[in-house]
């Protein structure tokens, strides 16, 4: 069974030149670590919990714990992030923010830059932000769910 390794796209430098000699096909591609298997382990529980969330605060907590589980799986316990190491930030472009502790961790940042972790966390954040906004726009429905009386 062949191991699949994703490769980063070639990016032009500020002068507009591509790395290597494209005409002869000689250029360096950097390998990118993939954590999609870890993502697939986290996704079912994350989706189920997000769909059951009844408040924006629950969405934030579910996102934090899902990302913590993702990072624990990716780093195999070498990093023990808190649930608030990556915080849902609905008003930011990425949808999340990294804690200073993670940003100051050289091992974490090297892996973050050389892997698909930013994309995976971004997808989790996108799902969480969508549900967060839905709950924020419909507080009446949320209240009915919470205070349902028969």
Image (cartoon, rainbow, N blue to C red):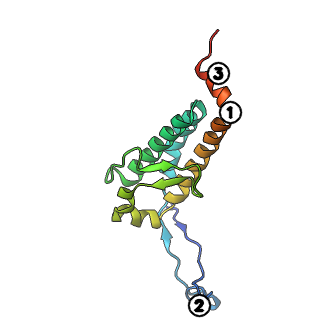
Which image quadrant is residue 54 in?
top right
Q: Is residue 113 above or below residue 142?
A: below
The residue tagged with tag 3: helix, strand or loop? helix
Q: Residue 131: percent from the left, percent from the top?
A: 63, 40
Out of 66 and 92, give the one closest to the viewer. 92
- Whether residue 46 sits left or right of residue 86 in the image: it is right
Residue 133 position in % (x across, y down): 64, 42
Cβ atoms at labels 1 and 2 below 8 Å apart: no
Question: Closer to the camera, 84 or 69?
Answer: 84
- The label on residue 144 is 3
Q: Are marks 3 and 1 in contact (CB under 8 Å)?
A: no
Q: Residues within 10 Å of mark 2 (few under 14, many from 20)?
A: few
C-alpha separation, residue under disc 1 versus residue under disc 2: 55 Å
Q: Secondary structure at mark 2?
A: loop
The residue mark sitting in front, 3 or 2, is 3
Q: Secondary structure at mark 1?
A: loop
The one nearer the camera, 61 or 66, is 61
Numbered label attached to residue 74:
none
Count neighbours of disc 1 (C-alpha within 10 A) and say few if under 14, some if 14 to 19, many if 20 or more: few
N-terminal of the pair, mark 3 or mark 1, is 1
Furthest-left residue in view?
78
Which class describes the residues within 10 Å of circle 3: few (<14), some (14-19), or many (20+)? few
**Label 3 to label 1: alpha-carbon separation:** 10 Å
Q: Position of residue 132 (x, y in %)?
A: 60, 40
Specify the quadrant that holds the C terminus: top right
Q: Which mark is residue 21?
A: 2
| 3D distance between C-alphas at marks 3 and 2 | 63 Å
- Observer-nearest residue: 142 or 3? 142
Per the image, the residue denoted by label 1 is: 138
Q: Please give the name of the residue rendered at 60% of the width and 34% of the height, measured from the top-left corner.
A: 51
Q: How many marks?
A: 3
Vertical side of 147 occupied by 61: above or below: below
């Amino acid at each position: 069974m062949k191991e699949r390794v994703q490769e980063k796209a070639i990016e032009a430098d500020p002068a507009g030149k591509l790395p290597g000699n494209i005409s002869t096909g000689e250029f360096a591609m950097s390998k990118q670590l993939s954590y999609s298997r870890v993502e697939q382990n986290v996704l079912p529980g994350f989706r189920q919990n997000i769909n059951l969330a009844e408040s924006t605060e629950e969405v934030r907590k579910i996102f934090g714990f899902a990302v913590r589980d993702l990072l624990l799986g990716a780093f195999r316990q070498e990093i023990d992030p808190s649930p608030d190491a990556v915080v849902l930030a609905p008003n930011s472009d990425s949808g999340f923010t990294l804690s200073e502790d993670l940003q100051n961790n050289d091992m974490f940042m090297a892996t973050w830059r050389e892997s698909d972790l930013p994309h995976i966390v971004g997808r989790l954040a996108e799902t969480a932000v969508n549900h967060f906004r839905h709950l924020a726009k419909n507080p009446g429905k949320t209240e009915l769910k919470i205070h349902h009386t028969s």
